[in-house]
Amino acid sequence: MAIRTEPFILNMGPQHPSTHGVFRMRVTLDGEVVLDVEPVVGYLHRGIEKLAEGRTYTQNIPFTDRLDYLASMTNNLAYVLAVEKLAGIEVPERAEHLRIIMAEMMRIASHLMAVGFFLNDLGAMMTPVLYMWREREKLLDLFEMVCGQRLTYNYMRVGGVSHDIPEEFLPALKRFVAEMPGLIDEYDQFLAQNEIVLARSKGVGVLPEDLAINIAASGPVLRASGVQWDIRRGDPYSIYDRFDFDIPVGSAGDCYDRYWVRVQEMRQSVRILEQAIPQLPQGEVCAKVPQLLRPPVGEVYGRIEAPKGELGFYLVSDNSIAPYRFRIRPPTLINLTALRDMVIGWKVADLIITFGSIDVCLGEIDR
Amino acid sequence: MTLLEQFQLWLGSIWPEWAAYITPAIIGIVVVLGFVLTTVIIFIYLERRLLGRFQIRTGPNRLGPEGIFQPIATALKVLLKEDIVPAKADKVVHWIAPIVVFAPILLIFAVVPFGKGAIFTDLNVGIVYVVAISSLSTVGIYMAGWASSNKYALIAALRAVAQMVSYELPVILSILGVVLMVGSLSMNQIVESQSIPFILLQPLGFVIFFLGTVAEMNRCPFDLLEADSEIVAGYHTEYSGMKFALFYLGEYGHAVAYSGIIATLFLGGWQGPLLPPIIWFLIKIVAVFCFIVWMRATLPRLRVDQLMAFAWKCLLPLAVINLFIIAAEVLWLPESMPWIMVVLNFAFAGVLILLWSKLFTLGGGRVEV
Amino acid sequence: MTIALNGEEVAKKITEVVPGSVAAADKMAVVVGSKSLYQVAEFLKNTSGLDFDYLNDLTAVDYLDYFEVVYHLTSLKHNHSLVLKTRCYEREKPIVSSVVSLWRAADFQEREVYDLMGITFEGHPNLKRLLLWEGFAGHPLRRDYL
């Protein structure tokens, strides 16, 4: 005799300790088993795309900080690269190197946060978070040294960066880069072989390779599913083609692989930093660009490999001081397309960690 | 003859019969309440500082020197909060649930020996009493979840019932192992017959009992009842004010009570050289509690089906095998050489744990929808 | 390096298979008529040699005379990219066919275009507003909204 059960809808509402922001999911549950997930977004919609149409190209840079607010440098970089492509501006060498250094530091900081909170979702009570934040604090101190800000940097400008680094920056960065590989090994050792982490995340929330390509996933989510595609390698921007680094690729596309890919990417970022720091040339940090920039009529799609995926800006210009269309391609919104497929049949706890492993940032989803 | 009974006899000689009957009971209640509440306050402070050290930060250190007034501030804050009851909640059940969760803790202390003869009642079925009373809290948790008329709380309450019921069995079986060696169910007897603490004589039993009680206490890694990354706050989502304080006290009270039971059953109770017995008892309780906090700081959480699988497929068979081994040893090994038992038991424990870790995986699964 | 395919050459290939679909083509992009969008998209995805299996971006621009829906496509296998566009000239009820059945990446992005620009995508399984709340009147990203 089968027990008659009735599915019910649970609202994991915008205020929830674990949805990484104001994200709402309407989950249909049968007991503990997830039958359906419907993401509801828009709680942080600020209308950036519309606002940007009334502001000059340089005035829009602070808007880009507030997209993925945990990785502001790479957001800025994507936007200014797109504008430079549109307007045909050359960036001086020193500025290119500084941009790469900042972008890779940002990648490490963002992945530390993602990995730490993934483990927090698994239940390890903030301990891994606080260990990883010890390093993130050092990175944030370095950023503060450069541009005075810890979170929304507004550092890149069209044609370069806004100011040069102070003299105490490079020695501090060298110290950080020297100790980081050992610390990454330490984290890996604590957590990668932990029986409970393996049991909870291996095989859970699988994103198969063909589905990953079909939903245009990008970043660690795509690479964990087995697709070797990194924009820094496949379509290099800035001066990434001068550096030597590997692209970690997972095999199973489960939560554990996404976590593993992020940890490996941190190692590769440290490698890039080790190569970039000695190569830093002298020179100017910003090209001479008019304050009210008027790019020629045209359009451009500029993209970079942000820590969360492929961040793209589609800009349409009509030769005025403000963009005609300012479109942001949000990597995490597109990565979320397959959330339902990844968690059907699993339990509520798995839903939380799968969602955490996609590593969303609501600022980017809602813009 | 316990201290309390001696006191009662002496009182009976100077006061009327009914006063001599009631006074020791009242004194006993006051002492238990005082002990539990004081220890709970100390444990709250200890946990927060210790957790801070594990997480490379200092814990609370603002209020008072090194933050020792922090738990008092916590208690005051919780007491002064407004008591909100959801409109659709079942009011009576909502009101009674915290009491049902907290009261059994006080009842457990009636049979825990604090020192030689310092026990409230020397029940000759002491350990059965403890097991029975400690299961009552489950009912309280379920009442709390049900009466809140909140889906999150209900999910948590159902998980609670499943978890606590499943973990009772390995706990009881490992207690039986101790009882076989002692030959009596009385808690006093159990302490007094531990010339070598049972943790050495029955390592497997200790491990099973310890994990089982950590699960009963809803602490990490089995704390999915209050997994605040999943179901907000579990069964006490809809509680605030004094009722929440009772749940909070109840959680730490359970920690004290079960640490006390572990200390009594496996660590030798109040026995120890030099210091007075009560101090040794407290040291052992604090040591067990520190270990529990260490587990909390380090391990992630199990999922509910993995939790069930762990209880039924791993702990329960090990507990049954442990019982057989202990019974065989009690029957055939000579009483006078307990050290053989120690070595044998450690060997068995090592082999069994290794075997189970190879054969048993925590994996679980995806249900076809 | 991802090679941006020349729109004119691709337009020639498209016209062989789906005649009359290409409205305009320049170096940057191929513009097709909105009626034949789905067939062209299917051709671009399934033809070997083109293999556009990755939809980077789906967005719309409001040039007051018409709406232009822009698709940025990439092929991971061949590492080349293309920009496909289509135009809708009705201002009141612009309708374009949905490409969700070809690339699921279009799911949320088409909902967003519907929400903010008001273009209806025929064939989309769940065309509801994404970023704004149900019951919001108007489509804010249009140039004549404010």
Image (cartoon, coloured by chain):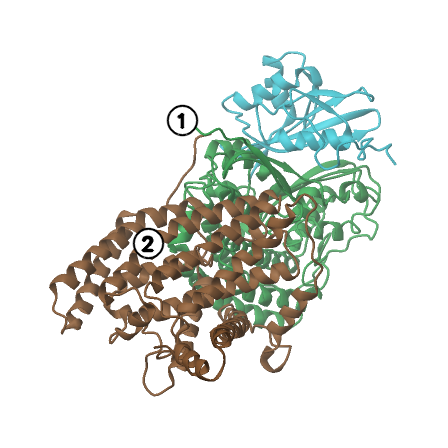
Q: Position of residue B19 (x, y in %)?
A: 51, 76
Tags 1 and 2 on a common chain: no
In front: A286, or A17?
A: A17
Q: What's the mark number on residue B170?
A: 2
In the rendered image of the structure, the colour used to display chain C is cyan
In front: B175, or A244?
A: B175
Q: Residue reaching furthest front? A: B16
Q: Where is residue A275 in the image (x, y as percent from the top left)?
A: 51, 61
Q: Is the residue under label 2 in contact with that under label 1 (CB below 8 Å)?
A: no
Q: What's the mark number on residue B13?
A: none
Q: Taking B131 as reference, is B201 above or below it?
A: below
Under tag 2, what secondary structure?
helix
Under tag 1, what secondary structure?
loop
Are there few (<14), some (14-19), or many (20+) residues within 10 Å of tag 2? Answer: many
In the rendered image of the structure, the colour used to display chain A is green
On what subunit does the disc labeled 2 rest?
A: B
User: Looking at the image, can residue C33 be seen?
Assistant: yes
Position of the N terminus of chain B by quadrant:
bottom left
- Specify the chain shown as brown: B
- Residue appearing at x 35%, y 64% in the figure: B126
- Residue appearing at x 79%, y 44% in the figure: A52
Q: Which amino acid does label 2 sit on?
A: Pro
Q: Taking B164 as reference, is A41 above or below it?
A: above
Quadrant housing residue A281: bottom right
Q: Mark 1 points at which residue?
A: A1
